[in-house]
Image (spheres, rainbow, N blue to C red):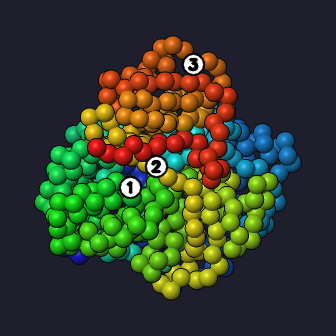
Amino acid sequence: MGLYTSLISGLFFPLHERFKKHSSVVVREQMEVSQWWEDKRLKALQLSRLCQLLTHVETHVPYYRELFTKIGFKARDVHSLSDLAHLPLLDKTIIRHNVGALKSENARHLARFNTGGSSGDPLIFYIGKERVSHDVAAKWRATRWWGVDIGDPEIVVWGSPIELGAQDGVRALRDRLLRTRLLPAFEMSAQKLDQFLDEIRSVRPRMLFGYPSALSHIARHAAAKGQRMDDLGIRVAFVTSERLYDEQRQQIGNIFGCPVANGYGGRDAGFIAHECPQGGMHITAEDIIVEIVDQQGAPLPYGEAGEIVVTHLATRDFPFIRYRTGDIGVLDSKPCTCGRGLPLLREIQGRSTDFLVAQNGTVMHGLALIYILRDLPQILAFKIIQESLDSTRVLTVSEEELSPELVEKIKVGFKARLGQGVRIAVEEVTEIPAEKSGKFRYVVSMVAPG
Ligand SMILES: [Zn+2]
């Protein structure tokens, strides 16, 4: 580890976290011990934390107080992890209708978030400081599996307006100290891609972080230009938020000369699992209980495919208990050759985002349009169909008819991204028909570039 990195990870970042009242430094240190524990000990930790969480929500979270009374559930009757199955599943519709009652009465400093990237249903929810600390710690631990620490130079290819909008002075200074450089994933014209390659060359990052589609798009551009990128000392490319296809893994790995590490999770569900250098997708078991359930919500045994349902144990301020991700996965009972006791998740299916092409040829990430819709609480589900460069249809489901102002706002947002001459049709429907996979509620169908 270089002197600068050890200063940042050993001094500056811990101070930063203490100032923000985050406990991520301590949590990460504990996690680096517990990752080697055997299964039995990890399960005992999960059970004790689950009991604490359920006891808390029974007393302080109005939604759960009422639910427990209604179904006759008592936190003190929980004696094994399988007792969790007595509680109903939590989904986006329930959160949407109970967003106030899901806040703990003694929660302080909640941050508002929204999501909707992968499953297509927009969702607004809240995150407390405990949750932030645990999610930061889990990511930090996983980067250290790959020899990358906080303070090592990093290129982040991301598109969230939350991240991009928050480039105020303090944030910019923090990013400079942590040596994080953000490249906007939403706009990828050939000229922008040239700039990205130059920036990556000048930063010489230890780590690339971003959507697999965006990183492989940059890799393809480098390959097409015959530009070498495998001589920069990049240790790992961390990808997340979308399904990682084998050809993307190969392309990113070949061009940047580094292994690709897949991560699974989201702002809503948390940092669920991450790949280690031996190829195992390790669940963040200290914080997250993963259940695989059938269509009726009943837990399935190891080895069987079903919907991934998570209970995040650091969410007492705004609980995520048996939360449906909408993704399909399999729990693996085999241990990983790396020796870590953290259990493994296999075959995550169900997340896909494509690129869109604006009228002027700019290739952009599908989330650029999804973000416009997902922050509108009126919209319950949507589907975007780019029929041609000149015409895009937006199907929406809402409880009440959308006002003409809101429809106009959507059209203005889409035109700003796709081009002023593009025809945008907003069609209100009662249901979004499922795709063949039964999972995708939106389609960002690709129009072949140029
Ligand atoms: Zn492993």
Above or below, comparing residue 1 to residue 187 in the picture: below
Q: Which mark is residue 353?
A: 2
Residue ranking furthest to the right: 72
Q: Residue at x 78, y 39 (%)?
A: 66
SS of the residue under disc 3: loop
Q: Which mark is residue 213?
A: 1
Q: Are marks 3 and 1 in contact (CB under 8 Å)?
A: no
Counting residues from the N terminus, which is met first, the one under dot 1 or under dot 2? 1
Q: Give the Cα distance between marks 1 and 2.
A: 8 Å
Q: Which mark is residue 402?
A: 3
The crowd level at tag 2 (other Cα within 10 Å; few <14, some 14-19, many 20+) is many
Q: Is residue 15 visible?
A: no
Counting residues from the N terminus, which is met first, the one under dot 3 or under dot 2? 2
- Left or right of 245 in this view: 224: left
Q: What amino acid is labelled 3 in the image?
A: Leu
SS of the residue under disc 1: helix
Q: Are marks 1 and 2 in contact (CB under 8 Å)?
A: yes
Q: Residue at x 26, y 68 (%)?
A: 255
Which quadrant is home to the N terminus?
bottom left
- Label 1 CB-ligand 1 distance < 8 A: no
Q: Residue at x 64, y 44 (%)?
A: 434
Q: Residue at x 78, y 42 (%)?
A: 67
- Left or right of 181 in this view: 21: right
Residue ranking furthest to the top: 404
Q: What amino acid is labelled 1 in the image?
A: Ser
| Displayed quadrant of residue 250 | bottom left
Q: Position of residue 283 (x, y in %)?
A: 55, 68
The crowd level at tag 1 (other Cα within 10 Å; few <14, some 14-19, many 20+) is many
- Nearer to us: label 3 or label 1: 1
- Left or right of 229 in this view: 354: right
Q: Which mark is residue 170?
A: none
Q: Position of residue 205 (x, y in %)?
A: 22, 64
